[in-house]
Image: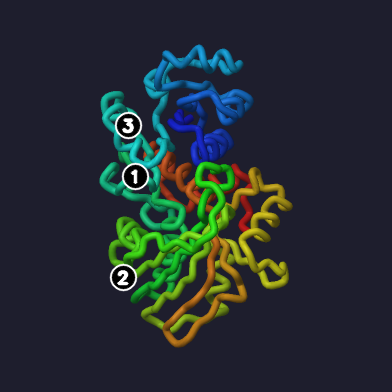
Amino acid sequence: MIKVAVNGYGTIGKRVADAVAAQPDMEIVGVSKTRPNAEAFVAQERGYPLYIADIKKKPAFEAGGIAVAGQIEEMLKQADVVVDATPGGVGAKNRPMYEKLGVKAVFQGGEKHEVAGFSFNAHCNYAGAVGRQFVRVVSCNTTGLCRLINMMDREYGVSKVWATMVRRGADPGDVKKGPVDAVVLNPVTIPSHHGPDLQTVLPHIEIVTFAMIVPTTFMHMHVMHIRLRSAPVRERIIELIRAHPRMGLVRSSTGITSTAELKEFAMDLGRQRSDIWENCIFEESVAVDGDDFYCFQAIHQEADVVVENVDAIRAMAGAVRDPEESIRITNEALGFIPI
């Protein structure tokens, strides 16, 4: 069994912990929190040993009825791999601790590529993560871009990509940012960081990305335009999407035309937290024109990187060397059948 610690039990960390706990070849040795809150209660309810960075805060946890197993260093000493799900920038500060203790670490897309020196997507470069001490799972948007662009590149060859990210303003539970009434260019400059980030995984892809944030909390939406090296066939693209283990085709017969309806659909399907781990490509938007391919795809910012973290753990531990096998194990353990 691969022993996994989750440092940072928040939006991503709690999802990764549950996904890891569901795997047949992994177990959670502990999770960490910096303060007692609702997520700390959930961790205790799940049976995850809870560790804290500052042991002086132990009385505050215990006063709230939350048992503390010890300090983070004690958790890390039990782990083969730690998933660092702390806020962006904190992971880089944690790296020396992981190095000192000799534990492998998975970082998130909020960190720079340099924190690990290797950025990961299971379908694109799984083999490169095998046995590594440090791996960075790229962000939710970049994960979605990697899956689709890599699929199209393998089938037709990609000449150039133009992608516009219409990004959610905040996660559903994030009340700090308050109500929003604007479309904000984020950034104003072109390209956005998503294109260079994708090139840390697929360096040969020429891509220009644009990004903005809008007043919603549910999901991101991508407007995709991919120029291919050979003429695509729409029916073949539909086949590829349907066959892909981490892509879902939003069929026109569902009547779904929005991210809100997608989230409701996932909830009605019984998905835990109504999470959507796959790219959601709208069937009616799939279009070709000569060598050009177009589509809309929705990306659930809280969920699509979760399964990638699980595969990264398995690769780093050297437990499974075939990416398709790891993807299959991960998906089946979660009962994940693409939309």
Q: Secondary structure at mark 3?
A: helix
- Residue located farthest toward the bottom when viewing the structure as drawn: 290
CB within 8 Å, label 3 to label 2? no
- In the rendered image, residue 321, in percent from the top left (x then y), is placed at 40, 46
In the image, which disc is placed on residue 206?
2
Q: Does label 1 or label 3 sit earlier along the sequence?
A: 3
User: In the image, is residue 261 above or below residue 255?
Assistant: above
Q: CA distance from mark 3 to mark 2?
A: 33 Å
Residue 246 in view of the camera: no
Q: Which numbered disc, 3 or 2, marks the residue that appears first in the sequence?
A: 3
**Between 306 and 231, which is closer to the camera in this rendering?**
306
Q: Is residue 24 above or below residue 219?
A: above
Q: Secondary structure at mark 1?
A: loop
- Disc marking residue 286: none
Q: Which residue is mark 3?
A: 94
* Residue 310 percent coordinates (x, y): 48, 42
What secondary structure is marked by label 2?
loop
| Residue picked out by circle 1 | 111
Q: Residue at x 62, y 50 (%)?
A: 336
